[in-house]
Amino acid sequence: MAGGIGRVVVGAALALLANAGAATAQGALAPHTAQPERPTVATHAGTVAPGWIEVESGVERDQAPSRITSLQTPTLLKFGVASRVQFDVMVEVVQPASGTTAGFGDAAVAVKWRLLDHAPLVGNFAVEPGLKLPTGSATRGTGTTDASLLLISSHVLGPVALDINVGYTGTSASGDTANAMLWTVSTGTTIDGPWAIAAELFGHPGFGARGSAGFLAGPTWTVRPWIVLDAGFIAKVAGNQPSALYAGITWNIGRLW
């Protein structure tokens, strides 16, 4: 996911997803088909098939408006635990600034539960509660315990996928930055054969603090139905959103049980 796994649900997105099928019901996909949630901040309502595991990992180089650069390698493990339920484990390695030693950042867990398929207005609809833990050091994490709730609405409009996310995060911090809001609107289509394009507009409204927004874009390549590669850039639209370059992979590894 763009912006780092440790920053659970603190942004918003408009995404052209690489796999239009990611917004369809689970039953429409073969269990070995990859369902990328990266590279965007947004996610879709799809869940990994029961007993199967999928991993997403990548690298992202951020440059803040202050020109301070950082490097992160977010990794998301997705376990299918029921026909509509997916359990996520999120970790990342962070290098806060040039010359700084890299190390583990904050970790998080989440459960995505798809409640509806092809419903009026909301389409495929899922909820995703999550919990982020302050496992990173002072320079590699937020130092807070965060509880989040994400609402996910996914649609397929012909060859185009549409995903809408709305979320809220409450943290153990105090003051104006203690809570954060999330909104996303995503769409996706294939360019040619295994090639697709991803684009995303995301924002961080916040409470009492200056918000931010960014734009993400880049190609994706379906190497095999179970392996999807991505790359692209993130540009600042408003606020203190860092610009970034990213690349990564989504791999549906196979059945665990």
Image (cartoon, rainbow, N blue to C red):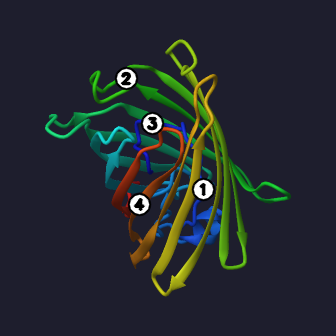
Residue type of the residue flagged with mark 3? Arg
Q: How crowded is mark 4: few (under 14 residues within 10 Å), some or many (20 or more)?
A: many
Q: Residues within 10 Å of mark 2 (few under 14, many from 20)?
A: some
Q: Earlier in the sequence, mark 4 or mark 3?
A: 3
Query: Viewed as shown, does residue 109 lie left or right of 162?
Result: left
The answer for how far apart the CA atoms under marks 2 and 4 are is 28 Å
> SS class of the residue under badge 2?
loop
- Please name the residue shown 72% across and 78% down the image: 158
Query: Viewed as shown, does residue 102 lie left or right of 251?
Result: left
> Which quadrant holds residue 102?
top left
Q: Which of marks 1 and 2 is nearer the N terminus?
A: 1
Residue type of the residue flagged with mark 4? Phe
Q: Which callout, 3 or 1, points to the residue nearer the camera?
A: 3
- Please name the residue shown 65% across and 68% down the image: 161
> SS class of the residue under badge 1?
loop
Across and down, in percent, residue 250 comes to 39, 62
Residue that badge 3 annotates: 7
User: In the drawing, what numbered circle is on residue 233?
Assistant: 4
- Please name the residue shown 16% across and 34% down the image: 100
